[in-house]
Amino acid sequence: MTVVRRHTTLPARDTTEDSMTAAPDDPTAALPGHPPIVDLATWQAARDELLVREKAHTREGDAIAAARRRLPMVELDGTVEVVGADGPVPFLDLFEGRDELVAYKHMWYDGTPHQGQCEGCTTTVWHMKDAAYLNARGVSFAVLTSGPWDEVAPYVEFMGYAQPWYSVRGVEAPVGRNMGHIVCFLRAGARVFLTYSTTGRGNEPVNGSMGLLDMTPNGRGEDWEDHPEGRPVIGDGREGYPSQGRQACWYWRTDADGNATWGPTSRPVPQWTRPGATPVQALGRHGHHH
């Protein structure tokens, strides 16, 4: 019997998917500008080693918090008036019947449009838009600002802030003055006391975005950080500041296209999410903040 062999030409195999999923010839080959590539067991060992340091850091933080709770306190006049949505009220009212109050003191540029207001204060207050968990623990939250109420009120409405805001223009410290601080107060009946205050990097615990960025391989992308050699410079110099790259807070302002800039076309980042936010050509700042 004669066997007839038939030759069938098969279509070329589509290797597109394979090329996307196949492992490289050397899976441990370094990727420039990235962390070294290792197997899971090696990664877990390095992660466990770092965890020991993280736990020690947490315990030290617990000890510092314990010392903070042991600070003395200073009595102040709880009847001093601040101005809010309902007009002048005594500072004591800000406790809303609770025994503790945390306040953030928001800087203000007089006569300045929304885009010119403080980007640093914006990042702090934006992360504290909801104080439900503080309230559940018996702590009230309020924003104090040195701005006049007739300027502050439309800004608060534009930003969509639900927290209570108060103007402390002309009020002495610790209720007024010294903006950019987180301040803690305690109430005992009708008596009010200052218990704690911090500023600068002491405000960082409020900013959850910073904590998350600190967990990422490229961090905050700021010049002061200890970055592994060869990592990309992801930040840029802020306009109006010495150009050193990766400057602190470089991404806190952007233009309408999302480009990081501190120039005249910028707004604090959350403002671009607000209804009515339009491109701008000037910050409108005149002099220093209060």
Image: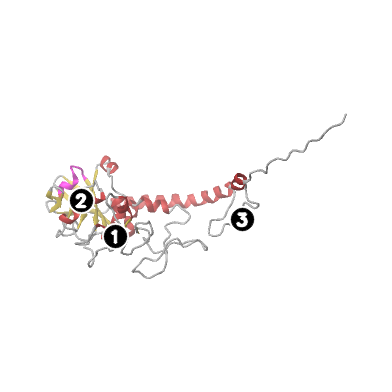
Depth check: 2 or 43 in front?
2
Depth check: 54 or 218 in front?
218
Dot 2 or dot 1, earlier in sequence: 2
Question: Three-letter amino acid code at disc 1?
Answer: Val
Question: Three-letter amino acid code at disc 3?
Answer: Ala
Q: What segment carries the magenta color? A: 92-99
Task: Determine whether the residue tagged by mark 2 lies in a helix, strand or loop.
Answer: strand
Q: CA distance from mark 1 to mark 3?
A: 47 Å
In this image, 75 relative to 119: left or right?
A: left
Q: Residues within 10 Å of mark 2 (few under 14, many from 20)?
A: many
Q: Which mark is residue 222?
A: none
Q: Is residue 277 above or below residue 17?
A: below
Q: Position of residue 288 (x, y in %)?
A: 23, 66
Q: Which mark is residue 29?
A: 3
Dot 1 or dot 3, earlier in sequence: 3
Task: Determine whether the residue tagged by mark 3 lies in a helix, strand or loop.
Answer: loop
Question: Three-letter amino acid code at disc 2?
Answer: Trp
Q: Residue at x 55, y 47 (%)?
A: 44
Q: Which residue is mark 1?
A: 280
Q: Residue at x 15, y 55 (%)?
A: 150
Q: Which residue is mark 2?
A: 165
Q: Which mark is nearer the camera, 2 or 1?
A: 1
Dot 2 or dot 3, earlier in sequence: 3
- Residue at the far bottom in the pictured view: 242
Q: CA distance from mark 2 to mark 1?
A: 26 Å
Q: Residue at x 14, y 52 (%)?
A: 83
Task: Locate the N terminus by quadrant.
Answer: top right
Q: CA distance from mark 2 to mark 3?
A: 55 Å
Q: Residues within 10 Å of mark 1 (few under 14, many from 20)?
A: some
